[in-house]
Image (tube, grey):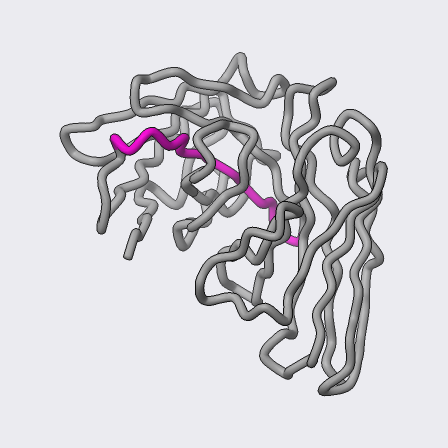
Amino acid sequence: QLQLQVSGPGLVKPSETLSLTCTVSGGSISSFYYWAWIRQAPGKGLEWIGSIFDTGTTHDNPSLRSRVTISVDTANNQFSLKLDSVTVADTAVYYCARQPGGSWYDWFDPWGQGTLVTVAS
Amino acid sequence: QFLLTQPPSASGTPGQRVTISCSGSYSNIGTNTVSWYLQLPGTAPEFVIHTNDDRPSGVPDRFSASKSGTSASLAISGLRSEDEGDYYCASWDDSLNNWVFGGGTKLTVL
């Protein structure tokens, strides 16, 4: 059964870079799927951050594009998120997910457990 | 606020049929599939179904999805207590080049 696990610091200082990794187990990341990052601010709705194909092709949320870097490490079955110049507005639970339909506009299934990242000094 | 509009709450008694609506526009629901997710408190969302009626093997066929024009619906028949939670709809938006989500509907089984 495919599982995704998010890892990374739970606390980031304002203006610094948020870095998270999603490790895929129970299947290969090189499976012609897109892999996505989604976040949810406390008590708020869901926000797509971006998606990456195993070749490295990415599609990003236009409102975050200037600060987002998503990369893939097929050797370690992982993909990563970097979000630059964070502010308190970036405080959220960050999820990773697979997009099994073969496109970045396909549904998300399954999701990783998510990790809360707090931006504070 | 949210580009897909959902009712904030819905409820039903065990065995009943409940429908949750999701209203959008041509550039999202009108053009693309709509997927539905269930989120329990403190947990990640889980994919339930999308409007091509494709659901994971663990999701019972009591759940069905449909769309018409710029609106979509999730129907749950034979309502059970374990169906409680927050349901979100989502769709790709061709104009925004972005995913859009509903604000969520809290389903309560009375």
Question: Could you say which quadrant of the image residue A75 lies in?
Answer: top left
Whether A24 is drawn above or below B78: the answer is above
Q: Is B82 on the left-hand or right-hand side of A96?
A: right
Residue B48 belongs to magenta span: no
Asked whether A41 or B49 is in front, the reply is B49
Query: Residue B68: where, in percent of width, then height?
Result: 83, 43
Q: Residue at x 68, y 48 (%)?
A: A44
Quarter occupied by the N terminus of chain A: bottom left
Asked whether B72 or B4 is in front, the reply is B72
Count of numbered labels shown in the rendering: 0
Residue stretch rendered in magenta on the structure = A30-43
Q: Residue at x 54, y 41 (%)?
A: A107
Q: Is A118 on the left-hand or right-hand side of B21?
A: left
Whether A78 is drawn above or below B102: the answer is above
Query: Residue B67: where, in percent of width, then height?
Result: 77, 46
Q: Residue furthest top?
A: A66
Whether B87 is drawn above or below A106: the answer is below
Asked whether A114 or A59 is in front, the reply is A59
Question: Could you say which quadrant of the image residue B48 lies in?
Answer: bottom right
Q: Residue at x 66, y 38 (%)?
A: B33
Q: Is A29 on the left-hand or right-hand side of A58?
A: left
Q: Is A23 on the left-hand or right-hand side of B49?
A: left
Query: Residue B90: where, in percent of width, then height?
Result: 66, 42
Q: Residue at x 40, y 24 (%)?
A: A52
Residue A39 belongs to magenta span: yes
Whether B86 is drawn above or below A61: the answer is below
Q: Residue furthest left?
A: A75
Query: Residue B55: where, in percent of width, then height?
Result: 53, 56
Asked whether B60 or A10 is in front, the reply is B60
